[in-house]
Image: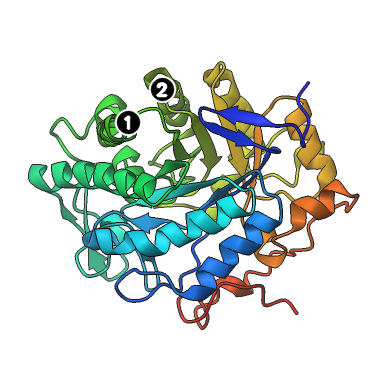
Amino acid sequence: MASLFDQLEIRSITMKNRFMRSATTSAYAREDGTLRQPIIDLYRDLAEGGIGLILTGHLYVLNSGKAHQGMAGISQDSHIAGLKRIARIVHRNGGRIVAQLNHAGIQHEPDRAGPSEYAGRNWRSRAMSEDEIQDIVGAFGDAAHRALTAGFDGVQIHGAHGYLVSQFLSRLVNRRNDPWGGSLQNRMRLLTAIYEEIRSTVGNAPVMLKLNCDDFSPDGFTVHDSGFVVQKMFERGVDLIEISGGGLGRREELIARANHDDSSLDEIPFAGHAARLRAKTGAGLMALVNGFRTLSTMRNIIERGLVDIVSMSRPFIRNPKLVQDLQVGQESATCIRCDRCLAPNVFGKEMLRCHLD
């Protein structure tokens, strides 16, 4: 039986425990996507805290894929120097770090290009051309090469939260009638093309995927779809799938369909869907993010084999040394999820930090 503080091997990465810092954007990079010093300091603090694996905040692979103000880039060689400083300081403090690669798709406000035309509030997206899609696939491969050049231990494809890969997977957003749309096999073609491009670039380095268990929309990406994608991506050789949730068309009242019927897992919103997906993973490694607060729940979910890794974001914003505190007996995270760190008056305008005190 696995334990929360056991080591875990992911290809060339040895995690010292089963904790992962889920990708959390600092939203404080310069306009050109290069990193400011406070971001470097943040990753030093996380590494000193003893987290088994650290994921960077999402990095845009093309300038046309930038999601928001303050997002850091990996779209050009000028980004490598700052990223190298992150990798170096994490390794110096005994940590392992993976770069999350992303493209915003229709969430890139200057030019909302995605799978199809899609109407948002006071805006409409356009459909990407075949050439644009191929350029994006190549850009993910180039970005993966930059990540390894910068010294990262691997990469993660962001396939969740309504960004481009998630948009292509969604039947709500992807209305194409060519090989990139229609059936789920076609809708996941962008994801598989990106994965194969990255794998051909990085060789034996770990390649991971962040995936929605459910978009929680009436007509989007469902847990049934997610199960199919999970199975196919493990067959292709992806090393770890991190399960999250919520995409375009999300409705809050639909999140309950991801609940587990075991009340001991009530603090984890996606525990029920995670159990359904676990049946599809075989020996594939799976992480779960969202809701973790108590040490007892973290232990429970690892010891019963529901997932292999506990992934957290907000608790590490409040306390980068949370893992060490839990290991010596602290019973829960101190983050109360007030979300002041994401308030419009601070997001992208100042360095990521906890605003509770």
Where does residue 51 sit, x and y in percent of width and height? 67, 49
Where does residue 74 sit, x and y in percent of width and height? 32, 57
Where does residue 350 sit, x and y in percent of width and height? 51, 80
Determine whether, in the image, residue 79 is placed left or right of residue 246.
left
Dot 2 crowding, Cα within 10 Å, few <14, some 14–19, many 20+? some
Tally of numbered tags: 2
The residue wearing badge 1 is: 199
State which quarter of the image contains the C terminus: bottom right
Q: Do the CB atoms of the residues marked 1 and 2 lie less than 8 Å apart?
A: yes
State which quarter of the image contains the N terminus: top right
Residue found at the far right of this picture: 329
Determine whether, in the image, residue 285 is placed left or right of residue 238.
right
The colour scheme applied to this rendered structure is rainbow
Label 1 vs 2, first from the N-terminus: 1
The residue at the point 33 percent across, 68 percent down is 33
Instruction: Name the foreground residue: 158 vs 77.
Output: 77
| Closer to the eye: label 1 or 2 | 1
Determine whether, in the image, residue 140 is placed left or right of residue 147.
left
* Residue 100 visible in rendering: yes
Determine whether, in the image, residue 39 is placed left or right of residue 187.
right
Instruction: Name the foreground residue: 189 vs 237.
Output: 237
The residue at the point 68 percent across, 69 percent down is 338
Q: Is residue 259 above or below residue 225?
A: below
The residue wearing badge 2 is: 237
Q: Amino acid at mark 2?
A: Gly
